[in-house]
Amino acid sequence: MTREYLKKASLTSKSNASETHNIVKGILDDIEAGGDTAARKYAAKFDQYQGNVLLTSEEIETACALVPKRLRDDIRFAHDNVRRFAELQKSTVGDVETEISPGFMTGQKVIPVDAAGCYVPGGRYSHIASAVMTVTTAKVAGCRHITACSPPRPEVGVAPAIVYAAHICGADKIMAMGGVQGVAAMTFGLFGLPKANILVGPGNQFVAEAKRILFGRVGIDMIAGPTDSLILADKAADAHIVATDLVSQAEHGYNSPVWLVTDDRGLADQVMELVPRLIADLPDVNRENAAAAWRDYAEVILCSDREQMAACSDEYAPEHLTVQADDLDWWLARLTCYGSLFLGEETTVSYGDKATGTNHVLPTSRAASYTGGLSVHKYMKIVTWQRTTREGSKSVAEATARISRLEGMEGHARAADVRLAKYFPNESFDLTANG
């Protein structure tokens, strides 16, 4: 049996991509030329905000005081989980050295980037968890300067809970500026900030496109957004939980794809019947987003067996991948392309989005086929070094000279020749390519 699409998407994440690119490119060029003044102009236009851009310590203290104690406790709980998981990740890579041949030492050194720019969405929703995910990992990695950037709201500024999260997680500066202008300000080093070496964090299609355009002059974690989620479910799955999980991810935005892949037609029919009812029960803005995402971007795919389901999932390479099926160990061993994996109905993407410690900044638009999500490793440069004695260089110099001449790179060969001549003047060497 070939795949059967019981529901097929009419749009993809690439729809309107060229229009978005042109808009973002124009804004970036304008801000690079106009600096602080141009960035403020766009903040006034898009955010209707003309307040202080870099929050003062007094403003941070005032915002933090507005956050209820229970929410502060929850944010600290999430921060502690993310910090501990990041510390575990950091422990998996470190400085090493080895004697690659007698007398010749080579090594690896891990160096954190100097300045990180963390984008925290705050327009449609206040993404408190994004502040925790991005700032905490940068801090654990050892970045010297961390800027947290989030869209302000008219007459309010950055959401107090985002300010609190960024502050306790270790942000050195908190910037009340969102969208392309916020990304540009961190990249170009506006408002007295150091130029970011890396930009991290999720965002809408304009933020994602800004990161895409700027990549190369600045590092990025990945092109993150719009978010997508796929559920693998068999006959053992609970249709109501599957439908609820699909809706929970569709509410991210009108263009957030959600996919169900199953080998059970009855389950698929139940889920497709339940989803519209669950969407209708959401609050207004959530309902509008989820309804559009389900209508235009969602797919329900019927497969013949679990192997075909797994192959379909790997092809889609989803940002979030949930398995609600028997034999979870089989799925863990078989699946290869995903940003983060959620095994069993007892866990859910929402847990990972907010508080379990694994990062929620993950590859979208099939990027999980070649990269993982945000981690301390994204902020760390793994560089190499070498050192040798004169005796230790002999065999390497001989091989280098001969390989270089075979390649036609005489200059490289001579860099080896002069060392052999200096260090071993009484010896002769056959350094021809055809020796």
Image: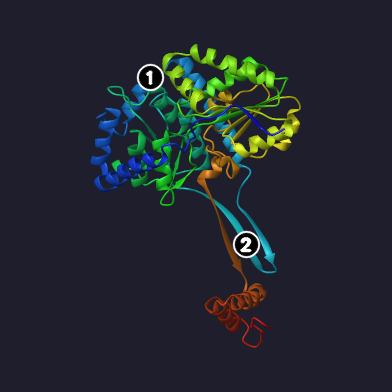
| Vertical comparison of 285 with 46: above or below | above
Number of the label disc, if any, that sits on residue 106: 2
Residue named by callout 1: 65
How far apart marks 2 and 1 lie (CA) works out to: 52 Å
Indicate the quadrant where residue 355 lies.
top right
- Is residue 216 among the parts visible in the rendering? yes
Q: Earlier in the sequence, mark 2 or mark 1?
A: 1
State the residue in front, 193 or 235. Answer: 235
Number of the label disc, if any, that sits on residue 39: none
Residue shown at 35% from the left, 38% from the top? 180
Quadrant including the N terminus: top right
| Vertical comparison of 253 with 134: above or below | above
Residue shown at 49% from the left, 29% from the top? 256
Q: Position of residue 296 (x, y in %)?
A: 49, 27
Crowd rating for badge 2 (residues with CA inside 10 Å; few <14, some 14–19, many 20+): some
For the residue marked with disc 2, what is the amino acid?
Thr
Image-based side of 54 in relation to 82, left or right: left
For the residue marked with disc 1, what is the amino acid?
Ala
